Amino acid sequence: MLQLYTWTTPNGRKISIALEEMGLPYAAHAVDITKGDQHTPKFLKINANHKIPSLVDEGGTIINESGAILLYLAQRSRQFMPDYGTPAYWQMMEWLMWQMAGFGPMLGQAHHFLHYNAGKSDYAETRYHTETRRLYGVLEGHLRNSPYMIDMLSIADFAVWPWVSRFEYHRIDLTEFPAVRAWYEALAARPAFARGYAQPVDVGPIPMPG
Ligand SMILES: N[C@@H](CCC(=O)N[C@@H](CS)C(=O)NCC(=O)O)C(=O)O
């Protein structure tokens, strides 16, 4: 059985959603980053970067970094990834990298300055809200012409969707981004997304736009 070390955050939920969609048996271990579990010697033996998620496969293979874990699981299960080297494969890679390099790191900063530390820095709030809105606009333009992040449901959707689930933290009104909203709601209705969202502890239902 796969061992997933995770918490109730977008990067963690990417992996639990992928595991649920792939139907792979796994055990979810809570690493409560609000209590500092990511800094314990036990966890650092698995992930020297002090961050969830981490995956340990049967036989002891350790994979860190959520993008690498998604690619590993897609290869392992032969699901949710186009054939290697095809145009669709590289399109999936493009959106996976877009999420890992932009739609995660920038929105993560928005969480800090707009949600957790609001009112501390006008400059940072404006910078990250502007960039967050710009990225939602890019996603909106893309999803107007595509049912998923590529033509099929793929690990790129598993990477992007959990970040959109924090739209309230981003001060984003999803009615302004109708294609993102339709895609978000359609995936939220999938039972595997609901199960993955509730890992490693259930903190309530998936946020839905009003
Ligand atoms: N690039 C990493 C980022 C992981 C990451 O930022 N994890 C956050 C939770 S979403 C974390 O563990 N934060 C704890 C900390 O920064 O101390 C990945 O994609 O796996």
Image (spheres, rainbow, N blue to C red):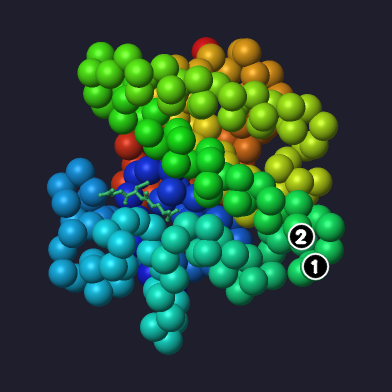
> Can you give x and y, in whole percent of width and height, for residue 24 in the image?
54, 67
| Point 82% across, 32% down: residue | 145
> Can you give x and y, in whole percent of width and height, for residue 89 in the image?
76, 60
Residue assigned mark 2: 89
Question: Which residue ends up furthest to the bottom in the rendered image?
Answer: 59
> Can you give x and y, in whole percent of width and height, for residue 127 in the image?
43, 22
> Can you give x and y, in whole percent of width and height, for residue 48 in the image?
28, 68
Task: Please tell me how crowded label 2 is: few (under 14), some (14-19), or many (20+) other residues with Cα within 10 Å.
Answer: some
Ligand 1 closer than 8 Å to label 2 CB: no
| Point 66% across, 47% down: residue | 95
Specify the label residue 162 is tagged with.
Answer: none
Give left or right: position of 87 versus 7. Answer: right
Q: Is residue 20 above or below residue 85?
A: above
Whether residue 26 is visible, yes or no, is yes
| Point 74% across, 33% down: residue | 142
Q: Is residue 101 above or below residue 44?
A: above
Residue assigned mark 1: 85
